[in-house]
Image: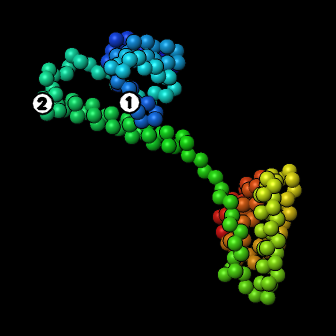
Amino acid sequence: MISRLIQQKAPIGSKVNFTLKSGHQVFGVLVEIGRDHICIKNKDGIATILTESIGAWEVIDISQEPPGKIDKAPSDRDVEIEIRRKIIEIETRFQTCIKNTRIGLKAPSLNFPSNEIQGRYYDNAGKVWDRIRNKYEYAQKINELSPKFGRIQLIANEIKSLVDRFPFSPTLKSHLGYFYYLLGNKPEALRLYKEA
């Protein structure tokens, strides 16, 4: 697809400037167009570029360049070409970053929310919390955080009992949401995160 488009816009022998998705630029004379690659001849030799890595290209028309332009101030056309090149470079860099971005849940710290838990059940809640943290750290250590091992369900049940006793604790709800996420109950996890 890209090879066909390059072939239509830049025939063999054209001077071209390719901007790769990585942000690098390759300049030279187009000498070969394959199905999945192109070859460019420049001062360093022949460069082969895979078409999947090409972000943009520009055909340089030498006949329209004024003679001796190196000694003169840049023309409006030169400035426009440089602006386009920079825009393509910036857009390509952002598109690459967006493609490589992943959103995921951060594992909880499991610090006891002492400022959110008050009353006569404080001491008991602290003991339950220590038990929860120990179970989680052990499951993490032996790499059994998957629901198929049954450890996460037990932890989620214990946190749920704390949430039932302390319904105004956002920390407990967010921790419960994380464990529901691990269990695959994403709607309930999302609801708990929103409440938290």
How many labels, in total? 2
Q: Do the residues labelled 1 and 2 touch (CB within 8 Å)?
A: no
Q: Earlier in the sequence, mark 1 or mark 2?
A: 1
Q: Residue furthest front?
A: 44
Task: Please say whether residue 185 is visible from this viewpoint.
Answer: no
Where in the figure is residue 19, as x and y percent of width and height? 40, 30
Give the label on residue 35, or none. none
Residue drawn at 31 percent across, 34 percent down: 84
Image-based side of 121 in relation to 99, left or right = right
Quarter of the view holding residue 60: top left
Q: Please, is residue 154 above or below residue 59 in the view?
A: below
Count neighbours of disc 1 (C-alpha within 10 A) and say few if under 14, some if 14 to 19, many if 20 or more: some
**Amino acid type indicated by mark 2:** Lys
Please state which of residues 110 and 57 is positioned toward the viewer in this rendering.
Answer: 110
Residue at 46% in and 33% down: 21
Q: Looking at the image, which residue is at 13% across and 33% down? A: 73
The answer to whether 36 appears left or right of 80 in the picture is: right
Query: Residue 94 placed where, x, y %?
Result: 45, 42
The secondary element bearing badge 1 is classed as: strand
Q: Residue at x 85, y 59 (%)?
A: 151
Q: Where is residue 111 in the image (x, y as percent from the top left)?
A: 69, 72
Residue 62 % position (x, y): 23, 18
**Residue with the mark numbered 2:** 72
Q: How far apart are marks 1 and 2 (CA)?
A: 25 Å
Q: Can the viewer see residue 184? A: yes
Residue type at tag 1 = Gln
Image mark for residue 25 = 1
Look at the image and tell me in which quarter the C terminus lies: bottom right
Residue in the foreground of this view, choosing between 97 and 190 = 97
State whether residue 78 is above or below residue 101: above
Q: In which quarter of the image is residue 144?
A: bottom right
> Could you tell me which secondary element the residue under label 2 belongs to?
loop
